[in-house]
Image: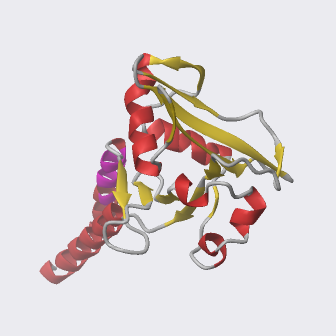
Amino acid sequence: MQIIRALVLLACITSFSSVYATLIESDLNAPGDGLLTIDTATGLEWLDVVVTLGLSFNQANASDFVTLQGFRHATESEMQSLFTAANLTNSPIRLAENYAGAVLLVGLMGPGTDAGNLIYIEGWYDAGGVYSSVASIDYAKDYMNGRTAFGGFFFSRDSTNPPTGNFLVRAVAEPATLALLGLGLAGLGFSRRKQ
């Protein structure tokens, strides 16, 4: 019975903590490099898009990021989760309510390409099958609005574009989940000791 109570408590705490998920900048190779963005809701680490600028989908797959460091291209549902974590709506037009989220994501995964008033990042992701697709995040400084666009565009996996990088992810053990698991195990140990 004690084990069941501890598991229920752990499930409640985990559910509560996922409601307050955030995107956190982290380091990849050296302290302060800030090349990762951790999505605490999904447990995914996102590599900054700018480190793969100009690489095709296939070239990124052959890079050390994929072959040695365990990254892979994000799926469309993972792209949607990233945008949701930043409170972004997938919209073909720029919306004022997307401005803060677009600034956040471009700042975390950029710096973005500066096209005058428009700041953006874009990258290839896995569209399934033999295709890649491109997702973009942009914001207009003067008009304080933002936009995300992805889905429905299919390209050869050898396509390149100088300002286009790659949305690469890898799964990690979420620190909050590990901490909660540790607390649950400690509680179980304490309840057994008490008996």
Tell me which corner region of the image, top left, top right, bottom left or bottom right, holds residue 179: bottom left
Looking at the picture, how far across and down is residue 42, in whole percent? 48, 53
**Looking at the image, residue 18 lies above or below residue 173:** above
127 or 4: nearer the viewer: 127
Q: Which residue is at 28% across, 73% downward?
A: 182
Look at the image and give the residue range highlighted in magenta.
10-18
Tell me which corner region of the image, top left, top right, bottom left or bottom right, holds residue 192: bottom left
Tell me which corner region of the image, top left, top right, bottom left or bottom right, holds residue 105: top left
**Looking at the image, residue 172 lies above or below residue 49:** below
Residue 73 covered by magenta stretch: no
Q: Is residue 6 left or right of residue 174?
A: left
* Quarter placement of the C terminus: bottom left
Find the residue positioned furthest to the bottom: 193
Looking at the picture, how far across and down is residue 24, in whole percent? 35, 53
Q: Which residue is at 83% across, 56% downward?
A: 158
Chief SS of the magenta region: helix
Q: Is residue 65 left or right of residue 14?
A: right
126 or 134: nearer the viewer: 134
Q: Which residue is at 17% across, 77% downward?
A: 190
29 or 128: nearer the viewer: 29
